[in-house]
Image (cartoon, coloured by chain):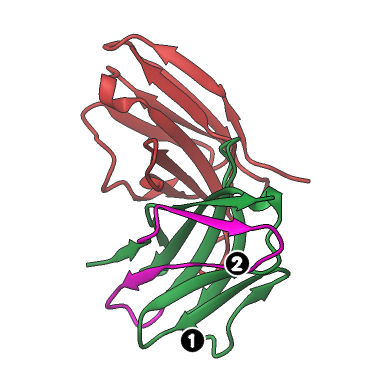
Chain colours: A green, B red
Amino acid sequence: AQKITQTQPGMFVQEKEAVTLDCTYDTSDQSYGLFWYKQPSSGEMIFLIYQGSYDEQNATEGRYSLNFQKARKSANLVISASQLGDSAMYFCAMLIGGFKTIFGAGTRLFVKA
Amino acid sequence: EAEVAQSPRYKITEKSQAVAFWCDPISGHATLYWYRQILGQGPELLVQFQDESVVDDSQLPKDRFSAERLKGVDSTLKIQPAELGDSAMYLCASSLEPPNTEAFFGQGTRLTVV
């Protein structure tokens, strides 16, 4: 079955510290993509980072990096130097079959001052 | 900056009434998605268009939901009749073309059925 699992309903992090949000996935496809999106309280989904299954290097975008461990089927998001504005819901998603994206249940991140 | 436009932002309707949502994707984006997001959960794909054609509507409750994208640009999602369980955020997104391209999301329509 194609599935995304995010086991952390909520996470707290101190401002300026790094935090890792967990994501594991299940797919029988050899070619797939993994995304992370941020959803602030205003509701819109904001794309953060993408990792292709054949990419050998972990993706990075500014303070965001994706720790991709293919054998373990995990694609954790690392946010470095957390900021108050990082407080939001974070969704891991997987592109399967070349065209369909499925989402995990999300992790709510709280950044403390 | 180009963005996906959705309207209305909020909608309250009585059960058994009809309701419609509109989405205008980013210009040039061939792929358009409608997602439903129940509070506390991740988005669930309802329907995906490639230009004006439906490529996936396996999770669309077709007895009450319909979606169209007649000219391959903007799209309408309709619910008739609405049920209490339809209360959710309805998100529209678009992308240039899968694979390997991120989807850009609109701000969503929050539907409350009373």
Q: Secondary structure at mark 2?
A: strand
Q: Nearer the viewer, mark 2 or mark 1?
A: 2
Are marks 2 and 1 in one subunit?
Answer: yes
Where residue A95 sits in the image (x, y, percent)?
A: 43, 66
Residue range in magenta is A7-31
A85 relative to B97, above or below: above
As measured in the structure, the alpha-carbon distance from the residue carrying label 2 to the one carrying label 1 is 15 Å
Few, some or many residues within 10 Å of mark 2 (<14, 14–19, 20+) = many
A4 relative to A65, above or below: above
The one of B37 and A6 positioned closer to us in this rendering: A6
Label 2 vs 1, first from the N-terminus: 2
Residue at horizontal 34 percent and vertical 9 percent from the top: B14
- Residue placed under numbered mark 1 in the picture: A54
Where residue B20 sits in the image (x, y, percent)?
A: 44, 21
* Quarter of the figure with residue A63: bottom right
Host chain of mark 1:
A
Asked whether residue B73 is in view, the answer is yes
- Residue placed under numbered mark 2 in the picture: A49
Where residue A84 sits in the image (x, y, percent)?
A: 69, 50
Residue at horizontal 74 percent and vertical 45 percent from the top: B2
Host chain of mark 2:
A
Q: Secondary structure at mark 1?
A: loop
B83 relative to A99, above or below: above
Amino acid bearing label 1: Tyr
Quadrant where the image shows the C terminus of chain B = top left
Any magenta on residue A21? Answer: yes
Amino acid bearing label 2: Ile
Residue at horizontal 39 percent and vertical 30 percent from the top: B88
Few, some or many residues within 10 Å of mark 1 (<14, 14–19, 20+) = few
